[in-house]
Amino acid sequence: MNERQVPHIKTPASTQIGELSERSRDIFRRIVEAYLETGEPIGSRTLSQRGGITLSPASIRNVMSDLEHAGLLDAPHTSAGRIPTQMGLRLFVDGLLEVGNLADDERKGIDAQLAAGGRKLDDVLMQASAMLSGLSQCAGLVVTPKRDAALKHVEFVPLAPQRALVIMVNEDGTVENRVIETPMGVPPSTFIEAGNFLSARMRGHTLEEARSEILAELTAQKAELNQLAAKLVAEGLAEWGGPQSQTPSLIVRGQSRLLEDVAATEGLERIRQLFDDIERKNDLIQLLELAKQGDGVRIFIGSENKLYSLSGSSVIAAPYSDHTRRVVGVIGVIGPTRLNYARIVPMVDYTARVISRLISQQK
Protein backbone atom coordinates (compact mmCIF):
# COMPACT_ATOMS: atom_id res chain seq x y z
CA MET A 1 0.00 0.00 0.00
CA ASN A 2 1.51 3.33 -0.98
CA GLU A 3 1.32 6.48 1.08
CA ARG A 4 -1.60 7.95 -0.89
CA GLN A 5 -3.95 5.09 -0.25
CA VAL A 6 -6.69 5.20 2.35
CA PRO A 7 -5.27 3.77 5.60
CA HIS A 8 -6.39 0.36 6.75
CA ILE A 9 -7.85 0.32 10.27
CA LYS A 10 -7.18 -2.79 12.32
CA THR A 11 -10.27 -3.37 14.45
CA PRO A 12 -12.37 -6.36 15.44
CA ALA A 13 -14.88 -7.40 12.82
CA SER A 14 -18.25 -5.71 13.21
CA THR A 15 -21.04 -8.06 14.27
CA GLN A 16 -23.94 -5.63 14.73
CA ILE A 17 -24.00 -3.24 11.76
CA GLY A 18 -25.78 -5.80 9.63
CA GLU A 19 -28.42 -6.22 12.31
CA LEU A 20 -29.48 -2.56 12.08
CA SER A 21 -32.00 -1.40 9.52
CA GLU A 22 -30.94 1.20 6.96
CA ARG A 23 -32.95 3.83 8.84
CA SER A 24 -31.34 2.94 12.18
CA ARG A 25 -27.86 2.97 10.67
CA ASP A 26 -28.46 6.41 9.17
CA ILE A 27 -29.84 7.87 12.43
CA PHE A 28 -27.06 6.27 14.46
CA ARG A 29 -24.33 7.56 12.12
CA ARG A 30 -25.75 11.09 12.22
CA ILE A 31 -25.95 11.09 16.02
CA VAL A 32 -22.35 9.92 16.41
CA GLU A 33 -21.02 12.39 13.83
CA ALA A 34 -22.91 15.24 15.49
CA TYR A 35 -21.62 14.22 18.92
CA LEU A 36 -18.02 13.98 17.71
CA GLU A 37 -18.41 17.46 16.24
CA THR A 38 -20.06 19.19 19.20
CA GLY A 39 -19.49 17.02 22.25
CA GLU A 40 -23.10 17.61 23.25
CA PRO A 41 -26.05 15.18 23.57
CA ILE A 42 -28.06 15.12 20.35
CA GLY A 43 -31.86 15.36 20.53
CA SER A 44 -34.41 14.32 17.93
CA ARG A 45 -35.39 17.90 17.10
CA THR A 46 -31.77 18.96 16.67
CA LEU A 47 -31.17 16.00 14.41
CA SER A 48 -34.22 16.74 12.26
CA GLN A 49 -33.06 20.34 11.83
CA ARG A 50 -29.58 19.39 10.62
CA GLY A 51 -30.97 18.51 7.18
CA GLY A 52 -30.77 15.42 5.01
CA ILE A 53 -33.36 13.53 7.02
CA THR A 54 -37.08 13.30 6.26
CA LEU A 55 -38.33 11.63 9.43
CA SER A 56 -40.36 13.54 12.01
CA PRO A 57 -38.87 14.18 15.48
CA ALA A 58 -41.28 11.59 16.88
CA SER A 59 -40.06 8.92 14.44
CA ILE A 60 -36.45 9.83 15.19
CA ARG A 61 -37.15 9.45 18.92
CA ASN A 62 -38.49 5.96 18.36
CA VAL A 63 -35.33 4.95 16.49
CA MET A 64 -33.17 6.54 19.17
CA SER A 65 -35.04 4.59 21.84
CA ASP A 66 -34.37 1.34 19.97
CA LEU A 67 -30.66 2.23 19.65
CA GLU A 68 -30.50 2.99 23.35
CA HIS A 69 -32.13 -0.34 24.16
CA ALA A 70 -29.47 -2.02 21.98
CA GLY A 71 -26.75 -0.42 24.12
CA LEU A 72 -25.46 1.88 21.38
CA LEU A 73 -26.77 5.18 22.77
CA ASP A 74 -27.08 6.62 26.25
CA ALA A 75 -29.04 9.48 27.79
CA PRO A 76 -26.75 11.42 30.16
CA HIS A 77 -28.41 12.77 33.27
CA THR A 78 -31.94 13.97 32.49
CA SER A 79 -31.09 15.30 29.03
CA ALA A 80 -33.48 14.51 26.21
CA GLY A 81 -30.47 14.08 23.92
CA ARG A 82 -28.37 10.99 23.37
CA ILE A 83 -24.65 10.30 23.13
CA PRO A 84 -22.96 7.15 21.83
CA THR A 85 -21.81 4.57 24.36
CA GLN A 86 -18.32 3.09 24.08
CA MET A 87 -19.89 0.07 22.39
CA GLY A 88 -21.61 2.48 20.03
CA LEU A 89 -18.36 4.26 19.24
CA ARG A 90 -16.70 0.91 18.54
CA LEU A 91 -19.55 -0.05 16.20
CA PHE A 92 -19.25 3.31 14.43
CA VAL A 93 -15.48 3.02 14.04
CA ASP A 94 -15.68 -0.57 12.80
CA GLY A 95 -18.51 -0.24 10.35
CA LEU A 96 -19.53 3.34 9.59
CA LEU A 97 -16.45 5.54 9.86
CA GLU A 98 -15.48 6.99 6.50
CA VAL A 99 -11.75 7.63 6.48
CA GLY A 100 -10.41 9.65 3.60
CA ASN A 101 -6.86 10.66 2.79
CA LEU A 102 -4.79 13.68 3.68
CA ALA A 103 -4.69 16.60 1.29
CA ASP A 104 -1.47 17.20 -0.64
CA ASP A 105 -0.58 20.26 1.46
CA GLU A 106 -1.11 18.27 4.68
CA ARG A 107 1.22 15.51 3.48
CA LYS A 108 3.81 18.07 2.42
CA GLY A 109 3.56 19.75 5.81
CA ILE A 110 4.22 16.48 7.64
CA ASP A 111 7.09 15.67 5.26
CA ALA A 112 8.67 19.07 5.89
CA GLN A 113 8.42 18.86 9.68
CA LEU A 114 9.92 15.37 9.78
CA ALA A 115 12.59 15.86 7.12
CA ALA A 116 15.65 14.15 8.57
CA GLY A 117 18.31 16.65 7.52
CA GLY A 118 20.97 14.62 9.32
CA ARG A 119 19.03 14.58 12.58
CA LYS A 120 19.13 11.61 14.92
CA LEU A 121 16.16 9.25 14.98
CA ASP A 122 15.24 10.27 18.55
CA ASP A 123 14.98 13.90 17.43
CA VAL A 124 12.74 12.93 14.51
CA LEU A 125 10.49 10.88 16.81
CA MET A 126 10.19 13.69 19.35
CA GLN A 127 9.32 16.10 16.54
CA ALA A 128 6.73 13.61 15.25
CA SER A 129 5.00 13.28 18.62
CA ALA A 130 4.94 17.06 19.12
CA MET A 131 3.62 17.54 15.57
CA LEU A 132 0.80 15.01 16.03
CA SER A 133 -0.13 16.66 19.31
CA GLY A 134 -0.48 20.02 17.58
CA LEU A 135 -2.39 18.69 14.56
CA SER A 136 -4.80 16.54 16.57
CA GLN A 137 -5.12 18.76 19.67
CA CYS A 138 -4.39 15.61 21.71
CA ALA A 139 -1.26 14.22 23.35
CA GLY A 140 1.25 12.67 20.94
CA LEU A 141 2.78 9.26 21.77
CA VAL A 142 5.79 7.44 20.36
CA VAL A 143 7.19 4.08 21.44
CA THR A 144 10.84 4.10 20.37
CA PRO A 145 12.78 1.03 19.23
CA LYS A 146 14.84 -1.07 21.59
CA ARG A 147 18.48 -0.05 21.34
CA ASP A 148 20.65 -2.27 19.15
CA ALA A 149 23.12 0.27 17.77
CA ALA A 150 26.77 -0.64 17.44
CA LEU A 151 28.89 0.58 20.35
CA LYS A 152 31.82 2.96 20.14
CA HIS A 153 33.03 3.60 23.67
CA VAL A 154 32.36 2.51 27.27
CA GLU A 155 33.45 4.44 30.35
CA PHE A 156 33.05 4.00 34.13
CA VAL A 157 32.80 7.16 36.24
CA PRO A 158 32.85 6.85 40.07
CA LEU A 159 30.00 8.74 41.75
CA ALA A 160 30.17 7.68 45.40
CA PRO A 161 32.06 5.11 47.52
CA GLN A 162 29.89 2.26 46.18
CA ARG A 163 28.29 3.67 43.04
CA ALA A 164 29.50 4.36 39.52
CA LEU A 165 28.03 5.69 36.29
CA VAL A 166 28.45 3.54 33.18
CA ILE A 167 28.48 5.62 29.99
CA MET A 168 27.95 3.86 26.66
CA VAL A 169 28.44 5.84 23.45
CA ASN A 170 26.93 4.31 20.30
CA GLU A 171 28.32 4.75 16.80
CA ASP A 172 25.17 6.67 15.81
CA GLY A 173 26.09 9.34 18.38
CA THR A 174 23.51 8.43 21.03
CA VAL A 175 24.64 8.16 24.64
CA GLU A 176 23.08 5.96 27.34
CA ASN A 177 23.86 6.00 31.05
CA ARG A 178 23.22 3.61 33.94
CA VAL A 179 24.20 3.69 37.61
CA ILE A 180 25.65 0.48 39.08
CA GLU A 181 26.69 -0.67 42.55
CA THR A 182 30.46 -1.14 43.03
CA PRO A 183 32.67 -2.73 45.72
CA MET A 184 34.22 -0.53 48.37
CA GLY A 185 37.67 0.89 47.73
CA VAL A 186 37.84 0.60 43.92
CA PRO A 187 40.83 2.70 42.80
CA PRO A 188 40.45 5.09 39.79
CA SER A 189 42.81 2.94 37.69
CA THR A 190 40.37 0.00 37.96
CA PHE A 191 37.51 2.05 36.48
CA ILE A 192 39.77 2.98 33.58
CA GLU A 193 40.88 -0.65 33.11
CA ALA A 194 37.27 -1.91 33.05
CA GLY A 195 36.21 0.77 30.55
CA ASN A 196 39.14 0.07 28.23
CA PHE A 197 38.45 -3.68 28.38
CA LEU A 198 34.81 -3.26 27.35
CA SER A 199 35.53 -0.62 24.71
CA ALA A 200 38.09 -2.85 22.99
CA ARG A 201 35.74 -5.82 22.79
CA MET A 202 32.44 -4.05 22.11
CA ARG A 203 33.52 -1.44 19.56
CA GLY A 204 31.60 -1.99 16.33
CA HIS A 205 29.28 -4.59 17.89
CA THR A 206 25.86 -4.34 19.50
CA LEU A 207 25.53 -5.08 23.19
CA GLU A 208 23.78 -8.38 22.52
CA GLU A 209 26.47 -9.45 20.05
CA ALA A 210 29.33 -8.83 22.48
CA ARG A 211 27.76 -9.57 25.86
CA SER A 212 27.73 -13.38 25.85
CA GLU A 213 31.28 -13.60 24.51
CA ILE A 214 32.64 -11.24 27.17
CA LEU A 215 30.79 -13.06 29.97
CA ALA A 216 32.19 -16.36 28.73
CA GLU A 217 35.69 -14.88 28.79
CA LEU A 218 35.17 -13.68 32.36
CA THR A 219 33.76 -17.04 33.46
CA ALA A 220 36.73 -18.88 31.99
CA GLN A 221 39.03 -16.33 33.68
CA LYS A 222 40.78 -15.70 30.41
CA ALA A 223 40.40 -11.94 30.65
CA GLU A 224 43.54 -10.13 31.76
CA LEU A 225 41.71 -8.22 34.48
CA ASN A 226 42.18 -7.95 38.20
CA GLN A 227 39.34 -9.17 40.38
CA LEU A 228 37.82 -5.73 41.00
CA ALA A 229 37.88 -4.77 37.31
CA ALA A 230 36.30 -8.09 36.35
CA LYS A 231 33.54 -7.48 38.89
CA LEU A 232 32.90 -3.99 37.46
CA VAL A 233 32.64 -5.42 33.95
CA ALA A 234 30.21 -8.13 35.08
CA GLU A 235 28.05 -5.62 36.99
CA GLY A 236 27.95 -3.31 33.98
CA LEU A 237 26.93 -6.08 31.60
CA ALA A 238 24.31 -7.37 34.04
CA GLU A 239 22.75 -3.90 34.29
CA TRP A 240 22.82 -3.24 30.56
CA GLY A 241 21.59 -6.70 29.66
CA GLY A 242 18.75 -6.81 32.19
CA PRO A 243 15.01 -6.35 31.65
CA GLN A 244 15.31 -2.55 31.57
CA SER A 245 17.49 -2.74 28.45
CA GLN A 246 14.72 -4.61 26.64
CA THR A 247 11.97 -2.15 27.55
CA PRO A 248 11.01 0.32 24.82
CA SER A 249 10.94 4.01 25.68
CA LEU A 250 7.83 6.18 25.54
CA ILE A 251 7.87 9.77 24.31
CA VAL A 252 4.84 11.90 25.24
CA ARG A 253 4.22 15.44 23.99
CA GLY A 254 1.28 17.77 24.60
CA GLN A 255 -0.18 16.25 27.77
CA SER A 256 -1.63 19.63 28.74
CA ARG A 257 -3.99 19.41 25.76
CA LEU A 258 -5.84 16.63 27.58
CA LEU A 259 -7.05 19.23 30.08
CA GLU A 260 -8.61 21.52 27.48
CA ASP A 261 -11.82 19.50 27.08
CA VAL A 262 -12.37 18.70 30.75
CA ALA A 263 -14.93 20.56 32.85
CA ALA A 264 -16.47 18.23 35.42
CA THR A 265 -14.65 17.32 38.63
CA GLU A 266 -14.82 13.61 37.81
CA GLY A 267 -13.23 14.40 34.45
CA LEU A 268 -10.34 16.18 36.14
CA GLU A 269 -9.83 13.20 38.46
CA ARG A 270 -9.73 10.83 35.47
CA ILE A 271 -7.17 13.03 33.70
CA ARG A 272 -5.05 13.15 36.87
CA GLN A 273 -5.01 9.36 36.97
CA LEU A 274 -4.24 9.28 33.26
CA PHE A 275 -1.23 11.52 33.85
CA ASP A 276 -0.09 9.13 36.58
CA ASP A 277 -0.41 6.18 34.19
CA ILE A 278 1.53 8.04 31.50
CA GLU A 279 4.29 8.77 34.02
CA ARG A 280 4.52 5.07 34.93
CA LYS A 281 4.54 4.32 31.19
CA ASN A 282 4.71 0.51 31.36
CA ASP A 283 0.96 -0.17 31.01
CA LEU A 284 0.61 2.38 28.24
CA ILE A 285 3.60 0.91 26.42
CA GLN A 286 1.99 -2.54 26.65
CA LEU A 287 -1.19 -1.13 25.12
CA LEU A 288 0.71 0.56 22.29
CA GLU A 289 2.75 -2.59 21.67
CA LEU A 290 -0.52 -4.24 20.56
CA ALA A 291 -0.47 -1.89 17.58
CA LYS A 292 2.65 -3.70 16.34
CA GLN A 293 0.54 -6.73 15.41
CA GLY A 294 0.08 -5.90 11.74
CA ASP A 295 0.41 -2.90 9.46
CA GLY A 296 -2.90 -1.17 10.12
CA VAL A 297 -3.98 1.67 12.36
CA ARG A 298 -5.30 0.44 15.71
CA ILE A 299 -8.01 2.26 17.64
CA PHE A 300 -8.45 1.57 21.36
CA ILE A 301 -11.62 3.06 22.83
CA GLY A 302 -12.12 3.72 26.53
CA SER A 303 -12.52 0.72 28.82
CA GLU A 304 -11.52 -1.76 26.09
CA ASN A 305 -8.08 -1.54 27.69
CA LYS A 306 -7.13 -2.32 31.29
CA LEU A 307 -6.25 1.22 32.39
CA TYR A 308 -9.14 2.69 34.38
CA SER A 309 -7.93 6.21 33.66
CA LEU A 310 -8.35 5.54 29.94
CA SER A 311 -12.06 4.79 30.39
CA GLY A 312 -12.89 8.19 28.90
CA SER A 313 -10.03 8.24 26.40
CA SER A 314 -9.18 6.80 23.02
CA VAL A 315 -5.80 5.88 21.55
CA ILE A 316 -5.14 5.86 17.80
CA ALA A 317 -1.81 4.23 16.94
CA ALA A 318 0.12 2.82 13.99
CA PRO A 319 3.41 0.89 13.77
CA TYR A 320 6.51 2.04 11.93
CA SER A 321 9.24 -0.18 10.46
CA ASP A 322 12.96 -0.27 9.69
CA HIS A 323 14.64 -0.87 6.33
CA THR A 324 13.89 -4.61 6.54
CA ARG A 325 10.17 -3.85 7.11
CA ARG A 326 10.48 -5.13 10.67
CA VAL A 327 8.16 -3.25 13.03
CA VAL A 328 10.35 -1.38 15.52
CA GLY A 329 8.01 1.15 17.16
CA VAL A 330 4.57 2.73 17.38
CA ILE A 331 3.32 6.29 16.98
CA GLY A 332 -0.10 7.69 17.84
CA VAL A 333 -2.24 10.06 19.87
CA ILE A 334 -4.31 9.85 23.02
CA GLY A 335 -7.33 12.02 23.67
CA PRO A 336 -10.99 11.98 24.70
CA THR A 337 -13.27 9.37 23.12
CA ARG A 338 -14.87 12.30 21.30
CA LEU A 339 -12.09 12.44 18.72
CA ASN A 340 -12.23 13.44 15.07
CA TYR A 341 -11.40 9.86 14.06
CA ALA A 342 -11.88 10.49 10.33
CA ARG A 343 -9.17 13.16 10.37
CA ILE A 344 -6.73 11.72 12.93
CA VAL A 345 -6.59 8.15 11.56
CA PRO A 346 -5.03 9.12 8.19
CA MET A 347 -2.79 11.64 9.97
CA VAL A 348 -1.32 8.95 12.26
CA ASP A 349 -1.12 6.46 9.40
CA TYR A 350 0.81 8.80 7.10
CA THR A 351 3.17 9.94 9.87
CA ALA A 352 4.05 6.30 10.65
CA ARG A 353 4.81 5.71 6.96
CA VAL A 354 7.02 8.80 6.73
CA ILE A 355 8.99 7.68 9.80
CA SER A 356 9.45 4.22 8.26
CA ARG A 357 10.75 5.82 5.08
CA LEU A 358 13.18 8.06 6.99
CA ILE A 359 14.51 5.10 8.99
CA SER A 360 15.07 3.16 5.76
CA GLN A 361 16.97 6.10 4.24
CA GLN A 362 19.31 6.24 7.22
CA LYS A 363 20.51 2.68 6.59
Image (cartoon, rainbow, N blue to C red):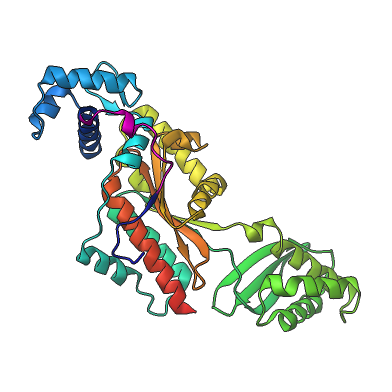
User: What residue is shown at x 47% (from left), y 57% (from top)?
Assistant: 330
Residue 49's place in the image compared with 354, above or below, is above
Residue 163's place in the image compared with 363, above or below, is above
Left or right of 362? Residue 231 is right
Residue 75 visible, this orientation: no
Residue 40's place in the image compared with 234, above or below, is above
Q: Is residue 13 magenta?
A: yes
Left or right of 174? Residue 219 is right
Magenta stretch, main secondary structure, is loop
Quadrant of res 169:
bottom right
- Magenta region, residue range: 10-22
Numbered disc total: 0
Residue 204 visible, this orientation: yes
Residue 132's place in the image compared with 325, above or below, is above
Q: Is residue 76 magenta?
A: no
Could you say where residue 354 lies in the image, as x and y percent from the top left?
37, 68
Q: Quadrant of the N terminus?
A: bottom left
Quadrant of res 244:
bottom right
User: What residue is shown at x 36% (from left), y 31% (from top)?
Assistant: 16
- The answer to which of 253 and 93 lies nearer the viewer is 93
Could you say where residue 253 lies in the image, as x and y percent from the top left?
40, 55
Quadrant of res 340:
top left
